[in-house]
Image: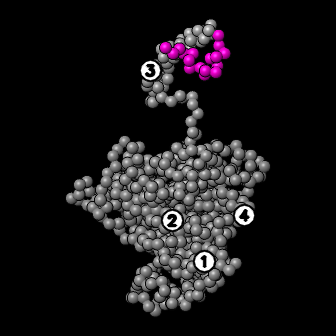
Amino acid sequence: MASPADSIPRELQDTFTLEQKEYLDGFLLAAAKRGQTFFAGHTANGLITADAASGADNQAAAKEETYFGTPVEDLCREERWKREENPLDVWDKLLAHAEENRFPEAADLFRFKFHGLFYVAPAQDSFMLRLRTPGCILTAHQMRGLADMAEAWGAGEAHVTTRGNLQIREFQPKDIIRVLTTVQSLGMSSRGTGADNIRNVTATPTSGLDPHELFDVAPLAQALNFYILNSRDLYGLPRKFNVAFDSGGAVSIVADTNDIAFIATRVPPGRSVPEGVYFRVQLCGITGHRQFAEDCGLLLTPGQTVAVAAAMIRVFTNHGDRTDRKKARLKYLIDRWGVEKFLEETEKRLDFPLLRFPLAECEPRAAVDQQGHLGVHPQRQPGMFYIGVAVPVGRLSAEQMRAIAKIAETFGSGEIRLTVWQNLILPHIAADRLKAARQAIADAGLSDAAGAFTAGAVACTGNKGCRFAATDTKTHAIALAGFLDELFPIMQPVNLHVTGCPHSCAQHYIGDIGLMGAKVGGDEGYQVLIGGGSDDRQGLGRELISAVRFADLPPLMERLFRGFFEKRAGDESFLAFTRRHPIEQLKDLMAVEEQA
């Protein structure tokens, strides 16, 4: 019969005496008995057990380190930075950089974006600050305070963005603490406006004003905003995230360009749910990747929308790609999973079921008024009006900001609405004060009746303030729109979207005319798209010109619009005209020659 000592290699056994072998037999037998009798380990659910048969892996054994389920070694650079130091915890670094008047290195440059601070070199050797304006609403007091801040420490102006918020530029490091604390003293925040966060939560800018709307969505946008600000885990997503609330009225919020969009809808009588106002949910709008948001089959009550948004964002946080920045948006998670699995994972985080309900059983969304955010319009409140003010490419001087604040207080309620078309709205103006209010707007160098092209011009920051942009987008947009306004008195707005690079911050794919900046023969130029639109005009622009110098673009556009006026059918819109004609026919109208 074998003894325990027989487990020792033969070459070692030969060196032991008989007495040593007997000692080893006894020692090893006792050790074996102790191991069998007094086992302690862990079960799969973490409980401690004395049963060796049910024990799990050694809890002390080294395990592969992960971050949101992704092996650390597979993380992209930005995810490693977030793991090494939470960007929300760098206040001491902000203080140090201000004290030393020093710009950050790459990792902290990324982390500072979580506080709304963007170092925009080499375009500008300074910081840009981006602000949150939940629901696209701010007060006259806040506008005036921001004007003072911009003038004291920045460039003396602010820019309205395509997410209905404000950016202020040219802050030096020594002033960033003053800037951030001033923002907070105004009751505002810049937290999460950059990097991998939920950007400004938008709402239809006429919410609560529009006689045709189904639901006032501004409170929903504001509720989600404050939920985000008070939920630490909703920072540091795999990539940026956009959420919008659409009231279902005459003015839209371009909801179909958002990662999640909640759109008010009405269910008529005779359906399987009580008649009334609900919300549809659209997912995965990302026009820079040539995709609109699509209805996912859900019907929500208004009170469910914020909870569903929070649940969906957390599913994305935990399962989005953290290895490849180009594949880290919500679209790619749902491409991988499918919509139904995404909804199932969302439902696991909710204490109420998600109702699947056919879109066809809801009333169609009302037609969108393209001019509803500009000019004078009656409100749902009797005797009250709002004025939509054109702000060419969103640029407001500090003096104009103060003038707008004064007009809002003097003639309205002190409230100011921003729009995703880089304009603004002044609400709650009585009929007998409209004339004086409009004159005050004109005295400020602004207008509520800008030309069709200028009013519809949208432009990103461009190469004057962004290192990615190839062109001076704002200057070019104003020049081209002004040129066309002088030649063609069009009563309908034509949307001109000018973006400086493929990131498409100005959403050039959805413009009647979309321009994307590029270098053409060493000069600033553009790729030209035609026939884009959103909402009930939804469609991605088609390439009309692959590359053209900006200096050569105005005469081409002049020939295009002359052809439009000569050949359009009745009062056909420019969009309908361009969509009706093949690209080659449109090129023939311009006699275009491609440039390398």
Q: Are marks 4 and 3 in contact (CB under 8 Å)?
A: no
Question: Can you identify the residue that label 2 sits on?
Answer: 289
Q: CA distance from mark 1 to mark 4?
A: 21 Å
The crowd level at tag 2 (other Cα within 10 Å; few <14, some 14-19, many 20+) is few
Camera-near label (2 vs 1) is: 2
Horizontal and vertical percent position of residue 507: 53, 68
Residue 215 lies left or right of residue 462; in this view the side is: left
The magenta span reads 1-17
Mark carried by residue 526: 1
Camera-near label (3 vs 1) is: 3
Count up the numbered dots. 4
User: What element does badge 3 sit on?
Assistant: loop
Question: Can you identify the residue that label 3 sits on?
Answer: 51
Residue kind at label 2, given as amino acid type: His
Residue kind at label 1, given as amino acid type: Tyr
Mark carried by residue 416: none
Query: Which is more toward the observer, 526 or 174?
Result: 526
Choose the circle earlier in sequence order: 2 or 1.
2
Look at the image and name its color scheme. Answer: one colour
Q: Which residue is rendered at x = 64% and y = 19% of the image?
A: 12
Instruction: Relative to 20, say whether 548 is above or below.
Output: below
Q: Which residue is rendered at x = 49% and y = 23% of the image?
A: 41
Residue kind at label 4, given as amino acid type: Pro
